């Protein structure tokens, strides 16, 4: 590698990266929290702050409205709500961050799925005056569904309840009990006031009864798990490289981004769905050969044998291959305005592969109030979370989502216009929920059967 590349690699490796998302009900103060986090951590440019001050002054506000740092759409500013997912990048001396500020309205729950799908931590805000509401439970369920390993309960607006410890304790107990029943592995409760800055970046002098970390301190110190040794190594082929030049007459490489785990030269791999095996003869990274590569690096892998491999194939270690099947049972969050119905023809996109599929059954829809399964709903509408059975035209190698978030997820797409219909997670996300009745609706005979 060049000197500049090495220096960049050293700088990036000096601090870890944490992806996290914020969520909560309407007016819980998500955007204000994010704005306060950026402002107090000195991550806001001068011109950005000046623009916020001008807009705030034009509205007659005495202090800058820090929510405007994230609410960038005109409709968001006019209505005072968050509509789209706003991504922000900032860093401290201890860690780098990618933040997704997601909407709070019920009709935008699907946006939270987008923001939290790659998050390693979710900050769920609760208004101390209102406590845990239905949307709070919905966001906790989505975090559990997406296997977000760390959840922070930020009890906001503590200044409006006179910083009472009893109010915070009651909310924290109710939320923790509910989230634990969903299988959320780790929950940290923090009392804050985003508007006043209490316990966001600096400890609050108004809550001496709280001895835990501030929001930023927790974000800087929470463990970020990147244990590559225990990952199931997965490499979806994105592009086959065959220059066929005089300099490289026999070069054949398979390019893509490593989805999980580690690949080494000399290791035997299996190509799915064909099941053929070969050894890795070389790995090219940034135009230079390396002996080992890991997620999320983009590399080109070469094999000893000339095997028919194309885009969408999956390279996995021999002996550690997921089962291939045309029948998939999964939990999905429906994100489209049009319903998803039994018998509907769709396209299923998994990593770099897209195949035709049919929704054979929708066994149940999740009821968030009591985590029960409503049997045989027949269809799913926007923001619904339910279980589906899909039959694909070709065999797919899909991991259980609980084992691999990257290779256990997929999208259902409308073949007519390319609209994303649902985000899917292979396996049963809520095994502890009430099982649905056995009766299911029969799919329509539309001539697209496999």
Image (cartoon, helix red, strand yellow):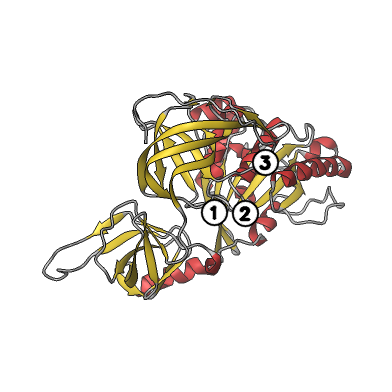
Residue drawn at x 35%, y 30% as measured from the top left: 448
Residue 289, by quadrant, is bottom left
Which disc number belongs to residue 140?
3
SS under mark 3: helix
Residue drawn at x 79%, y 33% as measured from the top left: 129
* Marks 2 & 1, CB-CB < 8 Å contact: yes
Q: Looking at the image, is mark 2 or mark 3 earlier in the sequence?
A: 2
**Residue 218 image position (x, y, % from top left):** 69, 57
In-image side of 324 versus 287 (left or right)? right
Which disc number belongs to residue 90?
1
In-image side of 342 versus 187 (left or right)? left
In-image side of 160 versus 407 (left or right)? right
Label 2 sits on residue: 41
Residue 28 visible in rendering: no
Give the farthest residue toward the front.
Answer: 438
Cα–Cα span, label 3 and label 1: 25 Å
Cα–Cα span, label 2 and label 1: 9 Å
What crowding class fits label 2: few (fewer than 14 Cα within 10 Å), some (14-19), or many (20 or more)?
some
* Marks 3 & 1, CB-CB < 8 Å contact: no
**Residue 192 image position (x, y, % from top left):** 75, 45
SS under mark 2: loop
In-image side of 155 versus 335 (left or right)? right
């Amino acid at each position: 590698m060049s000197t500049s590349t090495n220096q960049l690699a050293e700088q990036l490796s000096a601090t870890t990266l944490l992806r996290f998302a914020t969520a909560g009900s309407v007016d819980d103060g998500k955007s204000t929290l994010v704005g306060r986090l950026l402002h107090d951590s000195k991550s806001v440019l001068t011109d950005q702050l000046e623009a916020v001050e001008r807009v705030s002054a034009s509205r007659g506000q005495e202090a800058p409205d820090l929510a405007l740092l994230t609410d960038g759409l005109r409709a968001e500013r006019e209505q005072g709500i968050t509509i789209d997912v706003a991504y922000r990048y900032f860093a401290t001396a201890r860690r780098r961050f990618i933040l997704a500020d997601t909407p709070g309205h019920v009709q935008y729950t699907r946006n939270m799925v987008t923001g939290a799908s790659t998050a390693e931590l979710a900050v769920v805000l609760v208004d101390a005056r209102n406590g845990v509401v239905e949307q709070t439970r919905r966001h906790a369920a989505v975090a559990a569904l997406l296997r977000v390993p760390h959840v922070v309960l930020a009890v906001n607006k503590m200044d409006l309840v006179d910083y009472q410890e009893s109010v915070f304790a009651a909310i924290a107990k109710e939320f923790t009990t509910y989230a634990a029943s969903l299988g959320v592995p780790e929950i940290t409760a923090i009392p804050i006031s985003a508007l006043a800055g209490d316990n966001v970046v600096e400890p609050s002098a108004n809550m001496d009864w709280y001895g835990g970390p501030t929001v930023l301190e927790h974000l800087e110190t929470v463990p970020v798990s990147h244990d590559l040794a225990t990952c199931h190594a997965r490499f979806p082929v994105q592009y086959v490289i065959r220059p066929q030049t005089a300099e490289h007459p026999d070069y054949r490489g398979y390019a893509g981004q490593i989805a999980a785990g580690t690949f080494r030269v000399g290791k035997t791999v299996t190509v799915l769905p064909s099941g053929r095996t070969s050894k890795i003869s070389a790995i090219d990274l940034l135009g230079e050969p390396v002996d080992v590569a890991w997620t999320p690096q983009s590399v080109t892998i070469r094999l000893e044998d000339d095997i028919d491999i194309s885009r969408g194939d999956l390279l996995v270690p021999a002996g550690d291959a997921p089962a291939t099947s045309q029948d998939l049972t999964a939990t999905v969050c429906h994100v489209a305005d049009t319903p998803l119905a039994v018998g509907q023809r769709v396209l299923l996109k998994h990593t770099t592969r897209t195949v035709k599929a049919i929704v054979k059954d929708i066994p149940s829809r999740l009821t968030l109030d009591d985590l029960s399964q409503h049997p045989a709903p027949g269809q799913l509408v926007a923001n619904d979370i339910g279980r589906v059975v899909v039959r694909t035209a070709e065999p797919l190698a899909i991991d259980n989502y609980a084992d691999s978030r990257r290779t256990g997820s997929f999208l259902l797409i409308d073949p007519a216009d390319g609209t994303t219909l649902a985000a899917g997670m292979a396996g049963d996300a809520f095994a502890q929920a009430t099982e649905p009745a056995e009766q299911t609706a029969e799919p329509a005979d539309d001539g697209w059967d496999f």
